Amino acid sequence: MALDVDGTLLERDGSLPARRAEALAELAERVPVMLATGKTAPSVAPLLQQCRLQGPHAICNGAALLHADGTIEVLAELDPATADAITAGLERRGTAFAVYLGDGTICTPREDPRLTAITDLGEPAPRIGGPNGAALLKVLAVVDESQEAEFRDLGGDRSLRQRTGPSFLEWNAPGAAKGHAVAAVAARKGVPMDAVTAVGDAENDVTMLRRAGWGVAVRQSSPAAVAAADEHLEDDVADLL
């Protein structure tokens, strides 16, 4: 099973209901389970311990894998020149943004109260500064859905732009997607994709919902996730687990 985190396993406020945690921990004793999330490593680690998940797990929308020993394996790095063009465009628009790095840190050019939208979800506070040579995994901008059309020109075909929630628009390398990362892990484990169940709620889950043998969209999923899934849950995800 490949399971999204925010909006799927976790509530919108970032909390994990005890019933879901118990169901997931029990499932993971019998079935290989990986998380597939837009989050970075430090905010995922507590979930792995709580639910006894071995991994590896897809982080930063599939741009990297987090292994059980805490190491991060970069799968698809965002080209630095492309990242610079995206962040320059965000700067011109006065948009709050952060850059996620292959060492598990997040950076931003300056403090911005709008970035509490990511720390409220359990992400580490961005440090002030640049990438300092670490691999670039993604750029996250705090952009409301109603404003999305203003950002369609950023990145072009040199990046994969996708919405990961009502407040976030993100850019990854073209080869970075949850579907690619889930397929890579399944192949390493000798599991055919038609034996994989993928569960998610947002646009960044579409690739794994489509590639899995059974794609499940949870309650309150985006239209894109519902359209890509084989099933749309009416009950809590704990019942599925």
Image (cartoon, rainbow, N blue to C red):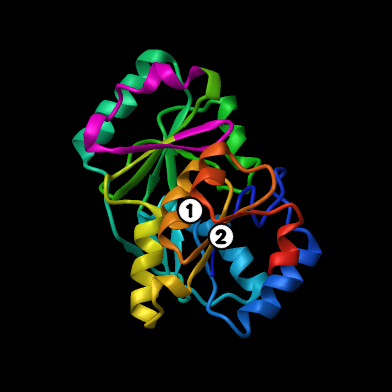
Q: Which amino acid type corresponds to the residue marked 1 in the rendered image?
A: Thr
Q: What stretch is highlighted in magenta?
A: 147-169
Task: Give yes or no for residue 150 being in the magenta stretch.
Answer: yes
Task: Give yes or no for residue 151 being in the magenta stretch.
Answer: yes
State the quadrant of the C terminus. bottom right
Q: Position of residue 28 (x, y in %)?
A: 61, 78
Placement of 229 over or under 220, stated as above or below: below
Judged from the image, the secondary structure of the residue bearing numbered disc 1 is: loop
Would residue 45 be found to the left or right of residue 99 on screen? right
Q: Which amino acid type corresponds to the residue marked 2 in the rendered image?
A: Val
Give the residue number, with chain letter if any, for mark 2: 44
For disc 2, the neighbor class at 10 Å (few under 14, some 14 to 19, many from 20) is: many
Q: Which of 145 and 231 is in front in this view?
A: 231
Judged from the image, the secondary structure of the residue bearing numbered disc 2 is: helix
Q: Where is residue 7 in the image (x, y as percent from the top left)?
A: 64, 47
Residues at discs 2 and 1 in contact (Cβ within 8 Å): yes
Give the residue number, with chain letter if any, for mark 1: 40
